[in-house]
Image: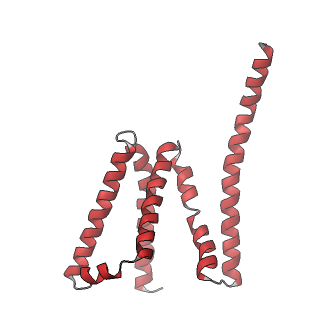
Amino acid sequence: MTKREIKGYIYAGIASLALANSFIFSKLSFSEVNFYQFGFFWFLVGTLWNFIYVLSLRYNKKFSFRASIKKINTELLSVSVLEAAATGLFYYAILVMENPGVVSFIGNIGPVFVVIFGVIFLKESFNKIQFLGIILAIGEASMLFWLHFYSRWLLLLPEKKEKQLTRQCWR
């Protein structure tokens, strides 16, 4: 493994920890501020972060603002709008659901859709081992998703039956 790959793994690990903290602290912050305030500051900080990044690239002569404006096209704008909508909906889901872990799990199904859309739109192909890994990942994600909802349904079932029996007794 090269030094660059090791750095990549370290950065990916740090990003995973930061994302996990983002789920928890966003749920905590919703008890202090409303969703719209959270969204405003979330995108404000993101915009400032990107601005600082662009300035650092410009300082190193790796970025030309004029050239980048000319390259903006419909696809880039579409991706930007989709990303903003996805981020907003993701944090709205954390707001309305009681457990941010469930939102995190559902959000982690994203790579499954990336693979499916890559095959459909980009005509990606995979070897047998990669295909087996994809099938296992999709199967595991589906199984965990359905087990979560099925177990909640089973847990609620006795309570519903008890309420029905109580109603029948008091009629």
State whether residue 38 is above or below residue 51. Answer: above
Spot occupied by residue 103 in the image (x, y as percentages of width and height) = 54, 52
Say whether residue 68 is left or right of residue 138.
Answer: left
Residue at (22% x, 85% y) in the render? 61
Q: Which residue in the rendered view is the most extreme toward the left? A: 59
Q: Which residue is drawn at the image coordinates 67% and 74% (left, top)?
A: 133
Please identify the residue farthest to the top as the structure is shown. Answer: 170
Name which residue lies at 66% across and 79% down.
130
Q: Which residue is farthest front?
A: 74
Location of the C terminus by quadrant is: top right
Instruction: Report x, y in % for residue 159.
Output: 72, 29
120 displayed left or right of 48? right
Q: Specify how the rendered protein is coloured.
A: secondary structure
Where residue 104 appears, as percent x and y from the top left, is 53, 55
- For residue 107, say whether it is visible: yes
Q: Which residue is painted at 26% across and 85% down in the image?
A: 62
Q: Could you say which is closer to the camera, residue 9 or residue 94?
A: 94
Q: Quadrant of residue 21?
A: bottom left
Q: How many numbered marks, from 0 up?
A: 0
- In the rendered image, residue 95, in percent from the top left (x then y), is placed at 46, 45
The image quadrant that residue 137 belongs to is bottom right
* Residue 63 visible in rendering: no
